[in-house]
Amino acid sequence: MKKINVNITRTDNTVSTYQVDYHQGMTVLNILEQIYRHHDETIAYRYSCRTGLCTTCMMMINGKPDLSCQKTAELGKDGNLSLAPLPKGTTIQDLVKEQ
Amino acid sequence: METLTTDVLIIGSGAAGLSAAVYAAQSNKDVLILDKGVIGRSGSSTGAVQIAGLGEWSDPGDHKQSYLNDINVSGRGLSDPQLTTRLAEDIEPRLKQLIDWGLKLDKDEHKQVAISHTSGHSVPRSLSAKKGKTGLGITHTLRKKATNSPHIQTWSDVITVDLIKASERVIGAVVFDLTTNKTYFIQSKAVVLTTGGIGQLFPITSNPVQATSDGFSLGLSVGARLIDMEQIQFYPVSIIAPQAIAGFCISFYHYAKLFNNKEQRFMEIYQPDTLEDSTRDKLSIAIASEIAKGNGTPNQAVWIDARDAIEQVKREFPHEYKVCNDRGVNLAIDRAEIGPAAHFMMGGIQINQEAATSVPGLYVAGETAGGLHGGNRLGNNALSECIVFGAIAGMNAVKEAERATILSVDPSLWKASSEYISHLFSATNGRVRPFQLKDEIQAIMGQHASVIRTTEGLETAEKQLKRVEHNLASIKITNTNVYSRELLDAIEVRHMLRTAKAIIKASLQRQESRGAHYIEDFPQQSETIQHTFINNKGGKLIARSQPVKGGPT
Ligand SMILES: Cc1cc2nc3c(=O)[nH]c(=O)nc-3n(C[C@H](O)[C@H](O)[C@H](O)COP(=O)(O)OP(=O)(O)OC[C@H]3O[C@@H](n4cnc5c(N)ncnc54)[C@H](O)[C@@H]3O)c2cc1C
Ligand code: FES
């Protein structure tokens, strides 16, 4: 199976890297679910509706703010999928902001 | 454990909880509304497309009585007349108030409030706001009102673990703050439960990830009675593939066509008069029967073809069109694979027309409450229920708070909750991860408690759930950081198990097919109309049946 390289900026500003199974059409949220289940149970992210309405799943995806449940998992210019918390506001843990 | 106090505690902040908060705060009582997700943005309310209602815009042929008739007919004899009457009476003033607070209803090309037809309603009475994002429109309006109130305190990311009872009254709740990993006892004079539905008990659901049935389990734990828990509405036309949007609801099926893998428009056989414009129970049973017969796609779905009505789809449901398109399904060219998804709990904690339960101090509203929709909820009546009964619950909780006093409480009352939380923090050597237990429950419910049920299947489910209960004792949690998804999953799975058991018990109790409960061994509707009730007696769930009020009709 094809794999993609995912870099996630954590609470302490370190970056964790994961090699995640990838199939076409996966959203960024699908990738995060794979990471929580099979790679790292400590990863923290937030979502609710999965349909682009609640906006609680918003994060920086390859440097741009976007909804992780709607955004197709794609590689950025550096060949990785890079995820980070939104820059504004207080971070609770990893990708989770106070809302 | 730290103790906090408030006059009224509201658990869950969808349309029902926010309505309760805003109406409760019209007194000068202190109101605390909390949510395990982000306040006002974590429930099914966010996804709701339209709301049914009456107002100055209504069709000339529409009035309270016709609305009431439609609900009663749709409920298959199980709707409680006290509740349906209250809904029909209160919907107009509640909607008017929301409009006064800033909700803008969508207009038609003549600049009049747009009213549209929904299957099962005898006249057009569905309203929308924010172009089909009505639930968002309503929760925004209420959230703004709540944040501006000096009497309302909001608290996100805090999950309710247990309700606490003393001298037969509910006196508060034990909650766990996910952002600090601290546990609190919140003592209150009245509690309103508005925790939404049960979708996450099933593998395919339209519901948000928070819909883990917590409220039903919390109610059961303090002795509240559950009514007609077998009545689960499956949304007939939900996306099955691609997986990224599995469970996504398609609203425009009444002007699209459904086909099986033999290219038959099968609704011509099941409902020749209404075709796809049928009620959700009948449509779900038809689709599930086709799939069970082997007439489905390899993904266990059937096809929806909306190409002939695509302009209307784009105009009226732009969000649905876009979400499908973004995932590679262009409805202007392609057909989509659809099937039933767990959508709405019509049963729930039994309430009366004052939103009161059988347990003093406990009020319930919205999807967690049972009795209004009976065996089949009419489309767009869930939001109506939330704004009407949310308001009633809020106002009555305040009246209760005026009568009650905060007494000093013996900490032994929350000892078990405290021990339970400590156990989660020391479960590093366990065997099963919390999400695996959730998966197990979903697989069992998906296989045995979906649209088509059998006695044998339900009995198997009962046994399999016992195995999950056994596994729960060996839960493994290694991440005890703040905002640990494992801790959240673990607390939720305990609620899920309790509610799943209640659903299976109620389904075995109803030995007939009525409304959304279709059981192959008893395919007919029986002559006497009975409710099923589930009670918790000393930790054991007891099921019984009782004829509906007013006797057989
Ligand atoms: C996709 C979709 C589309 C729908 N479309 C329509 C429609 O068009 N018209 C219509 O009338 N109805 C529709 N419905 C149904 C309707 O949206 C819901 O029944 C209704 O909004 C439920 O509102 P509620 O306030 O009872 O619960 P919710 O809005 O679900 O809110 C419950 C809240 O409680 C919180 N919570 C749960 N457990 C706990 C706990 N243990 N501790 C703390 N907080 C907790 C949750 O996080 C959540 O925020 C739709 C539902 C879905 C899923
Ligand atoms: S989860 Fe709601 S917008 Fe992404």
Image (cartoon, coloured by chain):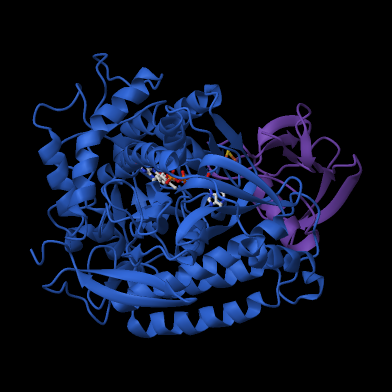
Chain colours: A purple, B blue
**Where is residue B381, by image quadrant?**
top left
**Quadrant in which the C terminus of chain B is drawn:** bottom left
**Res B212 visible:** yes
Expressed as whole percent of the image width and height from the top left, the position of residue B34 reads 57, 42
**Res B274 visible:** no
Question: Residue drawn 48% across and 42% down?
Answer: B324
**Where is residue B216, by image quadrant?**
bottom left
In the rendered structure, the answer to whether residue B19 lies left or right of residue B88 reads: right
Query: Foreground residue, B197 or B18?
Result: B18
Question: Residue drawn 61% across and 63% down?
Answer: B413
Query: Foreground residue, B483 or B81?
Result: B81
Expressed as whole percent of the image width and height from the top left, the position of residue A82 reads 80, 40
In the rendered structure, the answer to whether residue B89 lies left or right of residue A17 reads: left
Query: Foreground residue, B31 or B483?
Result: B31
In the rendered structure, the answer to whether residue B519 lies left or right of residue B174 reads: left
**Where is residue A77, by image quadrant?**
top right
Expressed as whole percent of the image width and height from the top left, the position of residue B415 reads 67, 65
Expressed as whole percent of the image width and height from the top left, the position of residue A44 reads 75, 49
Question: Residue drawn 46% across and 29% down?
Answer: B25
Can you say whether B384 is above or below B81 in the image?
above
Can you say whether B29 is above or below A1 in the image?
above
In the rendered structure, the answer to whether residue B17 lies left or right of residue A38 reads: left
Query: Foreground residue, A1 or B197?
Result: B197
> Ligand 2 sits in which quadrant?
top right
**Quadrant in which the N terminus of chain B is drawn:** bottom right
